[in-house]
Image (cartoon, rainbow, N blue to C red):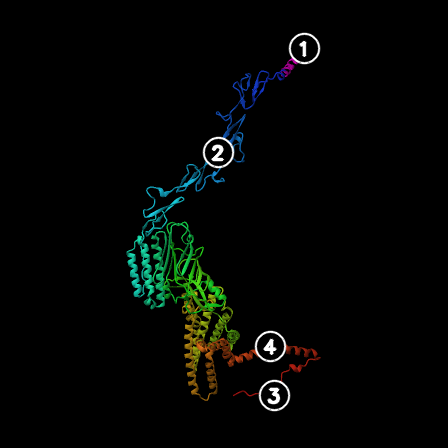
Amino acid sequence: MRNGHLSLLPGVLTQLLLPLGAAAQKTSDCARWCPLNSRCVNATACRCSPGFTSSSGDIFTNRLENCDDIDECRPPLAVSCGKFADCQNTEGSFYCECSPGYQLASGAKAFRNESENTCQGVDKCQLKPRLCKGRSICINTQGNYTCRCPPGLELNLSDPNVCSDVDECSFRPPVCHNSTVCINTVGSYRCCCRRGWELKPGFQNKQTDTTCQEMSFPAWTEPPGIKSQGLSHFFETVQVLRRDFKPALAQDTIKELIRGVDELLQTPQDLEALPRSEQHRVATNLLAGLEDVLRNISQSLPSGTLTFSAFAGIDLSLKVQEQGDRNVTLSLNQAKMLLSLDEVHGSSDSGPSVVGLVSTPGLGKLLAKAPLVLDPKQQALLRERKEWLGEVSPVLLSDVVSAFVSNKDTQNLSFPVTFIFSHRSVTPGPTQKAFCVFWEHSQDGGGHWSTTGCEMVVTRDASTTCQCSHLSSFAVLMAHGHVQKEDPVLVVITYVGLGLSLLCLLLAALTFLLCKAIQNTSTSLHLQLSICLFLAHLLFLTAIDQTKIKLLCAIIAGALHYLYLASFTWMLLEGLHLFLTARNLMVVNYSSVSRFMKRLMFPVGYGVPALIVAISAASRPSLYGSPTSCWLHPAKMFIWSFLGPVCVIISVNLVLFFMTLWILQSKLSSLNNDVSTLQNTRMLTFKATAQLLILGCTWCLGVLQVGPAARVMAYLFTIINSLQGAFIFLVYCLLSRQVREQYGKWFRGVRKAKAEPENYTLSSRAVSDASTPNTEMFSPPVSQGKSEPSR
């Protein structure tokens, strides 16, 4: 068996070595003609590389064959890339990528097969830079986007990502009404009135539905309640011009209107005879009406400049332009104006721009006595310098000049309009000040000069330059003022007197409050009067000049108004109580007086002043506080809300005072032998005389501060009234026997309280020094006799 196996061994070895011999033969016999993208198999065959094939298959022997790329992405697909992905063939291979509008979650660019597919949509509308340009709107779609245009725009044919404007004004039929002109804008259009046309009621200009009508002369009526033949004749002329107006004859109408105003102001005798308030109403009507008419009908004028001067001095300069220089300068004989049309008209506005300047020197006669109201900032500046305007009416230095443009809304301009006024040569004195002002209309049809929004840039002898943030009627005024000069002696007297009064009023109030023995109706009246005067004087000394904060100053003024009125009301109650007490001396009946006063005094003492102040504050809240002090403003007679009640109270107290004296004189004439009654009556007579000071009757000295004796009266008024609190303490406390007795008890109690600790100390020392106690010190005293009981 073993020999059998051994006999097979040469054959097995032969079979194992044959392949090795073949391989050695193949290596040495490899075909040299294999084409690109292949490798040889043996000396007669070649194999295509992976991803390539030949027409005979992967192995071929024909030397004329080539290995061509296998397109794995050609149907039928050899591989699947999955949803939202595309197969991309490469030389000898392939890869998968997401379809346009999608990307792999990992951010990679390619993947091999469906298992690696994480393609998801991309919002192309969020890409930067924007795919949809200009005004086009990007709409995101599934894996893509679309550019759409808003109304009034359309996609550009050459670039579908850009929207171009649609010129609606080229449409047929026209989009605008035939009374308007179409103006194309980006994405829309506007319809504007033709020249010589105005808006039809109920429509707005520069809208897509704007409808216009032929220009008309605006309504201008006579101010009601004014009786003037010249004014009536003028408005008859105005009505004729309005009736016959035609846009083509606008220039002639403007000239006729200027002549009419010129003739009215040339001979204004009947106007000057009118009351000042009616003169101001006429001037306001002329300024507003002339400005309104010129603004409207001048839009019918052709482009260019119109100047016209009337016989009596009215000058007019008008400029109408479609486009051009936006900086406009208009000049008159006595004034010049510089403005920017971009500010007052708006650079985007269409239609003609109208700018006008008219000078009406004759109006100065009607506005000569008009009041001047300063801007709050200027008031604060004068307050800091302790200056204010006097009661003399300001004087017009320049002509009244009205400026207008086609746009009515010319308030709060970003850049001010400059005015240069020429006027008569004048040098302001030390108490005079020039102001740039405008005529501000009031609700009653009148008006006043105001500096709000205007400031003076520079002033010279014969010219003044002003800048204003609005358009109106302007002028230059010279106002008279004066510097507040305080008499230092009066200031010292006021502070010393009021300081002494505050101390005395405090002592008097404490006396009336703490002294139980004297408390009755009289002391209740004294206590309330002392409290009101104390608070009024204290607030006056500490806060009368706190004018920086307007609201705080108004509150202080209201509080002073109330406290001083309350003080005078309690003075009235004092006078009434004194009279009733003196009258009841005849019958010695005090109970009825006490009951009457208890029911009356508090509602009257505090209620009546509160009612007066409430009515005053409700009717004129802005007049609490003035530029110089926190007191009632003198304007519009507002000070009489204090002086009126005070004058009534002083008059009533004087009557009560003299009636009291007459009653006391009658009492003294019927004297009897009762000495105590005589003494009480004389003391009451003395106190009644002193009531002149306490009842506030000396406040009438303030009315007498006029003429040569004004300085003397000012000193008497200040000295006497600043010491009113001291007089109250003197009469009601120091000259009262009951109060003096109570003061004596208080002083003895204080001295006794001080003496008791000293006695206690001395007795302690005596006890400690004694060796034995002395019992006699504690024995009762021996009676030396008995007093008989009174019989």
Q: What's the distance in space between the residues labelled 4 and 1, CA to CA? A: 158 Å
Q: Horizontal and vertical percent for residue 585?
A: 43, 82
What stretch of residues is rendered in magenta? 1-24
Task: Give the label, 4 or 1, closer to the camera.
Answer: 1
- Secondary structure under badge 1? helix
What residue did someone put label 2 on?
Answer: 100
Q: Amino acid at mark 3?
A: Gln
What residue did someone put label 4 on?
Answer: 753
Task: Give the label, 3 or 4, closer to the camera.
Answer: 4
Q: Amino acid at mark 1?
A: Ser
Is residue 193 depicted above or below 313 in this figure?
above
Q: Horizontal and vertical percent for residue 277?
A: 36, 66
Q: In terms of sequence position, does the residue under pointer 3 or pointer 1 come before the other?
A: 1
What residue did someone put label 1 on?
Answer: 7
Is residue 313 depicted above or below 119 in this figure?
below
Q: What's the distance in space between the residues labelled 2 and 1, CA to CA? A: 75 Å
